[in-house]
């Protein structure tokens, strides 16, 4: 069967089981857009290519399947660099197709030409410049294989216009074809048996162990086996920003989020631990604080599918390369074996003092804020709590980056995996709206709320036009404090309250009118008593997006806080410590 | 020439012989601010693969991270860090040197001592080729300098683990790509 490269590309995406792609056409990708009319794949027309990328990420984060974005050459390709980098930092499987100028024009500074593969080399797991239409099926299969296996990540396929128009003989490559063409790619998934037994012994004999669960748990679909490990060992768990939801917050051994804005118990339990069991986490600087002072007494068992993570920041005592799910299963087996003859002579310390200490921290230093019900000043935390308590337990929450993101992560109660979608590593402002749209497309059965800041919202809000026209009923809660809040917080605390270029104004733009102009329902909330009615109203609307403009307190700051570059021992609990006693 | 790095590492990287692979490899060094001291690349006996021999002046700890990151590149098949003391290294030097009636025979004699060859001749200059251990090539270069070097080009070293006596200390990076 003779097909054009463009037809082969779409047929290949269909063969990969793609249901939806997010994109925006243009000159160089035109041939590929023609067969889309006849394809089973749903195409969602975005308003900016960055939106296409973040939607693909949101889709991937909630479904576990690679998100697909398709855009043209030049400026479209550069516009999608941010989502690619975001997906790379957070290990999100994503396949990005870009058009390219015709082969003969490459390198001539042709209209809308840019060196897409060169630009994206350092923000993709791999990329290809396709030179023959005959290569397309193999490249597409490899793209999906690379994006979703090993440590997942974004890949990019750059297709010159003449290649899209070239005729080829259709074929569909086998697994063996893919393997033969990727001689350097053999991810290790099973852990080393000796290392696993070694880890099991450390776990069995630790007095103050903590499980440090990272995003790798979610990527490996390992939530269930993590639960098994906790049931088996009774070890408390911290869930990083990327791992929220991988272990239920309601579990008595869940300590919540560690790190710069983690709660006191999660941060301090890691600091005082004698064993950290790092599962799919990467010792990010926002978790460790000053590395040399991080968990000084702890031995480290580090499990990651990416060997480069082991020893990158903290040298582990027991490094295990492998898939989290498989390794945790093997670890559970090894721990059970220690209950038998293999464990004879092991001294198992009494952990009840440790657990009691943790309990006392939880009691003494819970997350705190004060909402005066009679005051007109609305606290952002109160909005999050009210939203949390008045939405289904499996609601998907997407957030942008900044104070609202931290409040959401701190105050939401995550009970299920894949209910939290955010930009962790890259910290991409503007992530929430398009990511929420992608998530809703992936899980139309779930309620999806974007918790956004006013600064973030202004970066990508136009994608609500996409949501309205495609009938994707996401809901957006803007915590509108009229500032770039997190920057304001740092300027207040570390730059002597010299506020430089952070004021945004609460009513410019008018968020309600803007929402309405984009085909959404717009609501405004200015006082605590209006919060619940607005949320209830929004929850009832299911035929279009809803935006609520919550006018929140500009002065509210995120606590606890570990100042950048300081030790996690120097955690600041609240205003009395952070503002010189004011 | 610039002085020999105090602690250089030789990294031998077997890659797929495809467009853009060298840029991917070089990018991992440049983005961390490490200068590649020398680099040689050519297809192996199996033309599907090329071997890149990189000499880099970097501490061991960052080198471990770089080699691990290199191994994550999809087109990288194998990486070995070669211990200079336990590997055979070779480098080729081509140099055009001013000669006159008096110095011509001296240059030819030195080329003979270094088992090199005269590859081109003109009335006022000779182009000579010397291959061998990089330190020996350094010596030859120094000896040529007083005669007046018109142009000089070295290839950068290529290296393979030494076979003698002990099993080769070919230290593959542990773990696999992900």
Image (cartoon, rainbow, N blue to C red):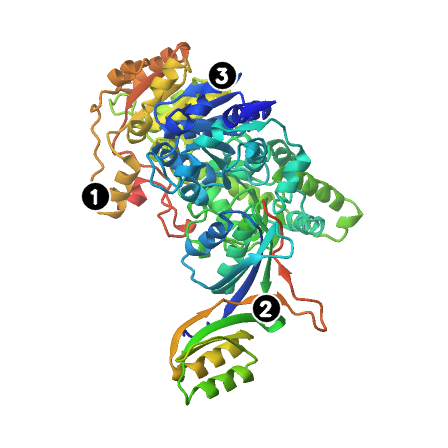
Observer able to see residue B73: yes
**Residue under label 2:** B83
**In the picture, residue A366 is in which quadrant?**
top left
Q: Residue A261: x and y, percent?
A: 40, 40
Q: Chain of mark 2?
A: B
- Say if A363 sits above or below B3 in the image: above
Work out which quarter of the rendered image holds the N terminus of chain A and state it.
Answer: top right
Q: Secondary structure at mark 1?
A: loop
- Quadrant of the rendering where the C terminus of chain A is positioned: top left
Residue beneath disc 1: A497
The residue labelled by disc 3 is A444
Q: CA distance from mark 1 to mark 2?
A: 55 Å
Using a 10 Å C-alpha cutoff, classify the residue at mark 3 as few (fewer than 14 neighbours), some (14 to 19) or many (20 or more): some
- Label disc, if present, on residue B6 of the rendered structure: none
User: In the picture provided, is A528 more to the left or to the right than A200?
Assistant: left
* Residue at (51% x, 26% y) in the render: A62
Q: Which residue sits at x=53%, y=16%?
A: A40
Label 3 chain ID: A
Please tell me whether mark 2 sits on a helix, a strand or a loop.
loop
């Amino acid at each position: 069967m003779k097909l054009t490269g463009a037809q082969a590309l779409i047929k290949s995406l269909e063969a990969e089981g793609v249901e939806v792609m997010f994109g925006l056409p243009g000159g160089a990708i035109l041939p590929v857009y023609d067969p889309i009319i006849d394809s089973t794949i749903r195409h969602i027309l975005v308003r900016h290519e960055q939106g296409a990328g973040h939607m693909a990420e949101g889709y991937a984060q909630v479904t576990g399947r690679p998100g697909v974005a398709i855009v043209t050459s030049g400026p479209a390709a550069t516009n999608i660099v941010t989502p690619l980098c975001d997906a790379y930092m957070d290990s999100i499987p994503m396949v990005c197709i870009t058009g390219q100028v015709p082969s003969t024009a490459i390198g001539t500074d042709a209209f809308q030409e840019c060196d897409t593969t060169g630009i994206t080399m350092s923000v993709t797991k791999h990329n290809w410049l396709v030179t023959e239409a005959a290569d397309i099926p193999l490249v597409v299969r490899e793209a999906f294989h690379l994006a979703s296996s090993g440590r997942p990540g974004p890949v990019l396929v750059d297709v010159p216009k003449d290649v899209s128009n070239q005729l080829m003989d259709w074929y569909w490559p086998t697994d063996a074809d893919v393997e033969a063409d990727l001689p350097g790619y053999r991810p290790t998934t099973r852990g080393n048996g000796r290392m696993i037994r070694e880890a099991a012994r450390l776990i069995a004999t630790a007095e103050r162990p903590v499980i440090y669960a990272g995003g790798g748990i979610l990527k490996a679909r390992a939530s269930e086996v993590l639960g098994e490990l906790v049931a088996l060992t009774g070890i408390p768990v911290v869930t990083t920003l990327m791992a929220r939801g991988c272990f239920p917050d309601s579990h008595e051994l869940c300590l919540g989020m560690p790190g710069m804005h983690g709660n006191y118990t999660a941060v301090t339990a890691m600091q005082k631990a004698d064993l950290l069991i790092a599962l799919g986490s990467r010792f990010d600087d926002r978790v460790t604080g000053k590395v040399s002072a991080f968990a000084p007494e702890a031995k480290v068992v580090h499990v990651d599918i990416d060997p480069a993570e082991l020893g990158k920041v903290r040298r582990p005592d027991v490094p295990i390369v492998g898939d989290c799910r498989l390794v945790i299963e093997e670890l559970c087996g090894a721990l059970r074996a220690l209950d038998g003859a293999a464990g004879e002579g092991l001294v198992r310390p009494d952990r009840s003092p440790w657990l009691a200490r943790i309990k006392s921290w939880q009691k003494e230093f819970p997350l705190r804020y004060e909402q005066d019900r009679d005051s007109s000043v609305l606290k952002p935390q109160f909005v999050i709590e009210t939203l949390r308590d008045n939405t289904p337990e499996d609601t998907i929450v997407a957030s942008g980056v900044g104070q609202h993101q931290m409040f959401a992560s701190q105050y939401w109660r995550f009970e299920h995996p894949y209910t939290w979608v955010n930009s962790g590593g890259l910290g991409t402002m503007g992530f929430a709206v398009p990511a929420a749209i992608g998530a809703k497309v992936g899980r139309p059965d779930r309620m999806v709320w974007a918790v956004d800041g006013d600064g973030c919202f202004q970066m990508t809000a136009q994608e609500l036009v996409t949501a309205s026209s495609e009938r994707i009923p996401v809901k957006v809660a803007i915590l509108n404090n009229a500032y770039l809040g997190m920057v304001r917080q740092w300027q207040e605390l570390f730059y002597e309250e010299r506020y430089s270029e952070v004021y945004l104004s609460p009513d410019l733009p008018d968020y309600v009118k803007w929402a309405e102009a984009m085909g959404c329902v717009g609501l405004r909330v200015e006082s605590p008593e209006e919060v619940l009615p607005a949320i209830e109203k929004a929850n009832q609307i299911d035929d279009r997006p809803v935006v609520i403009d919550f006018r929140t307190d500009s002065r509210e700051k995120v606590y606890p806080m570990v100042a950048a570059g300081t030790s996690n021992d120097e955690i600041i609990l609240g205003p009395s410590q952070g503002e010189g006693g004011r | 020439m610039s002085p020999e790095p105090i602690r250089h590492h030789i990294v031998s990287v077997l890659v797929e012989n495809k467009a853009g692979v060298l840029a991917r490899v070089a990018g991992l060094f440049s983005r961390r601010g490490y200068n590649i001291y020398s680099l040689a690349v050519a297809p192996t006996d199996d033309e599907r693969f090329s071997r890149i021999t990189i000499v880099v002046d970097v501490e061991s700890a960052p080198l471990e991270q770089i080699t691990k990151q290199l191994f994550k590149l999809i087109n990288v098949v194998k990486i070995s860090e070669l211990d200079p003391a336990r590997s055979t290294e070779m480098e080729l030097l081509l140099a055009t040197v001013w000669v006159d009636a008096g110095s011509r025979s001296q240059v030819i004699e030195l080329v003979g001592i270094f088992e090199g060859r005269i590859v081109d001749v003109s009335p006022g200059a000779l182009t000579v080729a010397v291959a061998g251990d990089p330190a020996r090539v350094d010596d030859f270069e120094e000896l040529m300098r007083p005669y007046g070097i018109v142009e000089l080009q070295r290839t950068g070293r290529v290296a393979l683990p030494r076979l003698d006596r002990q099993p080769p200390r070919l230290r593959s990076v542990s773990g696999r790509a992900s």
